[in-house]
Image (tube, rainbow, N blue to C red):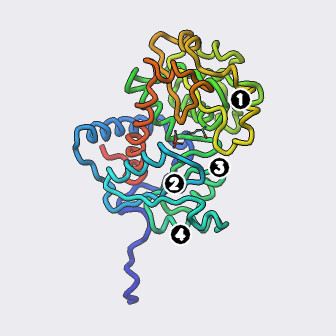
Amino acid sequence: MNPLHTGIPSTLPQGAPPLRHYLQFADFSADEYHYVLQRAAFIKHKFKTFVRHQPLVDRTLAMIFEKASTRTRVSFEAGMYQLGGSVVHLTTGDSQLGRAEPIEDSAKVISRMVDLVMIRTFEQTKIERFAAHSRVPVINGLTNEFHPCQILADIFTYIEHRGPIQGKTVAWVGDGNNMANTWLQAANILGFKVHVSTPGGYEVDQAVAGVRSSDSYQVFADPMQACAGADLVTTDVWTSMGFEAENETRKAAFADWCVDTAMMQAAKPDALFMHCLPAHRGEEVQAEVIDGPQSVVWDEAENRMHVQKALMEYLLLGRLD
Ligand code: CP
Ligand code: NVA
């Protein structure tokens, strides 16, 4: 027998569930979200009470960044260490990814050495191509089209503050971007409504958002009307990463899509304000709103870590209770 052949398959840990990726919000069912959100609360409570929770000892997460990040990097990195694992951080500039090694080859190699991969990149097709050739779960850490980990954290944060999101109304004010698309998917799956208001030319595109019907969202020309009666008002930068060349045109087009105190007053009295951050005070949101009493943006940022810990655990180990 060849002494180098151990017979151990270099794929997922023993007893692991079938290979799943998390490339967009629609990749999980409502039932799976129910589990992952409950599990995030359990994991967060353990962390806050200094009870060690390390189901991913000896497991490694590769994080590939083709765009800048603060929250996504820190939350995944800290979260993976807390789970007992370790991380490898790669960027386009410091790896062969930036020297045109095919994505497919990169996926085959990286996924033989690590147990999970998180990718922040441009087109959704890039992460899909990587996942198609990966032996291990791939997580979307933001693409031009989607930001599912952020919306997972936002929904967890809403539930923490106000209870179930089912039947509620979320007002989206601003760009029809990756965040807006992901809100539309989440509304479809979890049974809430999104009021979308964007300037002309920056609308959400149902096909890009990957939703089949407009049942769970409604478009408003006037952002004040979108906010009327909302349970949650949320926005994002006017210019997303990768679109910097459009910055000046966008500033002019979006001038009336700044979430201000009047919009918050149009929403329900107990409405929350969220922003995935980074924020530009005086552009998409007034300082009085993001720094005001209805804002939960710091909880929202922190919760990235707790929900992603639950997500990584679920992808690698499946349901544990
Ligand atoms: N919200 C978010 O994804 O932040 P970063 O760009 O800092 O990761
Ligand atoms: N829509 C923003 C989100 C940043 C976290 C972007 O893609 O740049």
Residue 121 rendering spot, x and y as whole percentages:
61, 51
Q: Is residue 7 left or right of residue 30?
A: left
C-alpha gap between disc 4 and disc 1: 42 Å
Q: Which residue is mark 2?
A: 138
Q: Which residue is mark 4?
A: 109
The reply to whether dot 4 and dot 1 touch (C-beta < 8 Å) is no
| On-image quarter of the N terminus | bottom left
Q: Which residue is mark 1?
A: 251
SS at mark 3 in the image: loop
Depth check, mark 2 against mark 3: the one in front is 3
Residue 128 rendering spot, x and y as whole percentages:
61, 53
Of all residues shown, which one is farthest toward the bottom? 1
Q: In which image quadrant can residue 145 be found?
A: top right
**57 relative to 50, above or below:** below
Depth check, mark 3 against mark 4: the one in front is 3
| Residue 93 visible in the current orientation | yes
Which amino acid type is shown beneath numbered disc 1? Lys
Q: In which image quadrant can residue 113 be found?
A: bottom left
Cβ of disc 1 within 8 Å of ligand 2?
no
Q: Residue at x 42, y 23 (%)?
A: 164
Q: Reading the chain from its start, which is encountered first: label 2 or label 3?
A: 3
Q: Reading the chain from its start, which is encountered first: label 1 or label 3?
A: 3
C-alpha gap between disc 3 and disc 4: 21 Å
Depth check, mark 4 against mark 1: the one in front is 1
Q: Is residue 255 left or right of residue 11?
A: right
C-alpha gap between disc 1 and disc 3: 22 Å
Depth check, mark 1 against mark 2: the one in front is 1
Which amino acid type is shown beneath numbered disc 3? Phe
The local crowd at label 2, few if under 14, some if 14 to 19, many if 20 or more residues have their Cα within 10 Å, is: many
> In the image, which disc is placed on residue 122?
3
Q: Reading the chain from its start, which is encountered first: label 2 or label 4?
A: 4
Q: Reading the chain from its start, which is encountered first: label 1 or label 2?
A: 2
